[in-house]
Image (tube, rainbow, N blue to C red):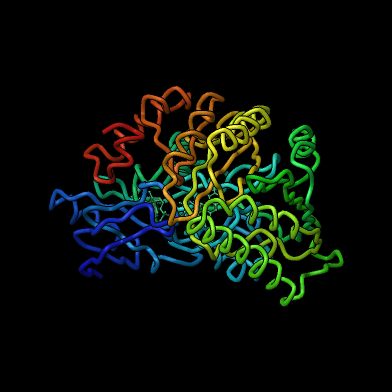
């Protein structure tokens, strides 16, 4: 289906474009026709998932492919737990689709709005030193290349391309199907606790090593953090889910409500931010509950923000974090959004931020109505000095020159790009910057 396009904006309102046209293919063949048509007209073409990337990676100046109609399960291999999904399937649909199969995602990030292809193509990750990002669970894909051909990549067909296409930045083709290796459904015990920042930083390595999933949030201008520790449990263990009202009060009123209030205050009266942050710090409280994994992993983000996130060698996290804290104090910035710190296992996906190194992530956020440039630039300088790799879906200013140094297989990835998209049918200004034209 072809529609005349209005202006597209991403979730964080950091990118906008008016595509020449928007198409909404409902089958792999319709995707192929769209790529062929774009090629005949000499236009670039770009699929969009949930538009949740903060970077310009999903910007489609010419033809935008809306893949919301390319959704659902197409094949199941019960013996291996592998499920093939249409690439536009949103992550929040997975619990309902997978429940009859008794399967679940091995790990998840903070939210579940993304599409399977959008999330994996940008290196979306959760936390847990024993678990890789979402793309590491991909065992095969089917895509339409820049020359309009279908290509299957899995362990038996074109296997040498798998480390590239699992996390392809949308630069290698339009994924139409993704095969994911899932795990038997499981539950999580969640524990949230306010703790002193210094103690958490000092014990960072032990904390991430000692838990299935550990992360913490720090509100700048305070000395305490909220730690979150999730422990994997069998589904048949006794569960203690949160009462919906308690969840509403904790997540909507206290979490989203507090962040919203501090953010708006920070915008209209910046000097009040540290005071508001201290009030939030005092309101932080301990809570514990357990539930099916998907219900624990995903939360709702009601207040819009912009984000930059860097992946660091795991052991660099405490030093880099301390520098960020000192920088905020030195520069007198009033930062209303918390800094989030997570971890992930090393993997072998060429452009994964955790490629071949145990990884810690430091993410900084800014309310979407505030200009993040100065804050993000200052933090980015610190991250770069610690050997950081930027999250592809979040704001950063790195170029191909830097990324070639950061990723040992960068040139191998470019060679696959030359092979699958020789005419740069899928490029956009962001990809030109990070991969080179
Ligand atoms: C509130 C919020 C919370 C977030 N939490 C996390 C988190 O916890 N962890 C984390 O790592 N990230 C997180 N992110 C970032 C987000 O997961 C990623 O940036 C991801 O890109 C979003 O997926 P999407 O479906 O919105 O993709 P989009 O932003 O729409 O697209 C991203 C890229 O994927 C490409 N693409 C989409 N579909 C296809 C396809 N079929 N074939 C080929 N390429 C395709 C697009 O062309 C584009 O290049 C968060 C973002 C927001 C806004």
Q: In the rendered image of this protein, does residue 5 appear above or below residue 53? A: below
Q: Residue furthest left?
A: 41
Q: Residue at x 50, y 32 (%)?
A: 389
Residue 55 coordinates in the image, percent (x, y): 40, 46
Residue 359 coordinates in the image, percent (x, y): 62, 34
Would residue 102 be found to the left or right of residue 179 on screen? right
Q: Residue at x 43, y 59 (%)?
A: 11
Q: Is residue 381 visible?
A: yes
> Looking at the image, which is closer to me, 220 or 105?
220
> Looking at the image, which is closer to me, 242 or 418?
242
Residue 88 coordinates in the image, percent (x, y): 43, 61
> Looking at the image, which is closer to me, 274 or 204?
274
On the rendered image, what quadrant is the C terminus found in? top left
On the rendered image, what quadrant is the N terminus found in? bottom left
Q: In the rendered image of this protein, does residue 387 appear above or below residue 286? A: above
Q: Residue 330 appears in which quarter of the rendering?
A: top right
Would residue 116 be found to the left or right of residue 203 on screen? left
Residue 257 coordinates in the image, percent (x, y): 61, 66
Q: Is residue 76 visible?
A: no
Q: Residue at x 72, y 54 (%)?
A: 281
> Looking at the image, which is closer to me, 386 or 327?
327
Would residue 164 be found to the left or right of residue 235 on screen? left
In this rendering, the count of numbered labels is 0
């Amino acid at each position: 289906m072809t529609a005349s396009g209005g202006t597209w904006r991403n979730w964080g309102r950091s990118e906008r474009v008016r595509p020449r046209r928007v198409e909404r293919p409902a089958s792999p063949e319709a995707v192929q026709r769209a790529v062929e048509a774009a090629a005949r007209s000499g236009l670039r073409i770009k699929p969009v998932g949930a538009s949740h990337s903060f970077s310009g990676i999903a910007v489609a100046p010419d033809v935008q492919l809306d893949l919301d109609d390319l959704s659902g399960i197409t094949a199941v291999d019960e013996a291996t737990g592998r499920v093939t999904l249409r690439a536009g399937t949103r992550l929040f649909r997975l619990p309902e689709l997978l429940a009859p199969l008794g399967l679940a995602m091995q790990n998840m990030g903070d939210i579940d709005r993304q599409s399977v292809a959008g999330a994996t193509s940008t290196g979306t990750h959760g936390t847990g030193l024993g678990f890789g990002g979402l793309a590491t669970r991909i065992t095969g894909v089917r895509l339409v290349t820049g020359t309009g051909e279908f290509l299957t990549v899995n362990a038996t067909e074109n296997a040498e391309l798998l480390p590239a296409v699992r996390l392809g930045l949308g630069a290698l083709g339009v994924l139409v199907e993704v095969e994911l290796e899932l795990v038997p459904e499981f539950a999580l015990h969640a524990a949230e606790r306010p703790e002193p920042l210094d103690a958490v930083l000092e014990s960072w390595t032990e904390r991430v090593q000692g838990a299935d999933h550990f992360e913490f949030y720090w509100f700048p201008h305070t000395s305490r953090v909220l730690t979150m520790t999730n422990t994997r449990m069998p589904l048949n263990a006794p569960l203690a889910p949160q009462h919906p009202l308690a969840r509403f009060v904790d997540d909507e009123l206290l979490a989203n409500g507090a962040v919203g209030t501090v953010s708006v205050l920070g915008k209209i009266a910046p000097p009040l931010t540290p005071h508001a942050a201290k009030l939030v710090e005092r309101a932080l409280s301990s809570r514990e509950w357990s539930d099916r994994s998907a219900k624990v992993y995903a939360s709702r983000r009601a207040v819009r923000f912009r984000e930059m996130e860097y992946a660091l060698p795991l052991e660099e996290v405490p030093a880099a974090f301390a520098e960020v804290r000192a920088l905020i104090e030195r520069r007198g910035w009033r930062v209303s959004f918390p800094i989030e710190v997570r971890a992930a296992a090393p993997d072998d996906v060429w452009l994964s931020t955790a490629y071949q190194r145990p990884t810690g992530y430091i993410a900084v956020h800014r309310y979407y109505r505030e200009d993040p440039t100065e804050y993000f630039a200052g933090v980015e300088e610190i991250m770069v000095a610690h050997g950081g790799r930027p999250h592809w879906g979040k704001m950063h200013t790195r170029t191909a020159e830097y990324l070639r140094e950061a990723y040992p297989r960068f040139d191998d990835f470019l060679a696959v790009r030359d092979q699958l998209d020789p005419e740069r049918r899928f490029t956009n200004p962001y990809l030109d910057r990070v991969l080179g034209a």
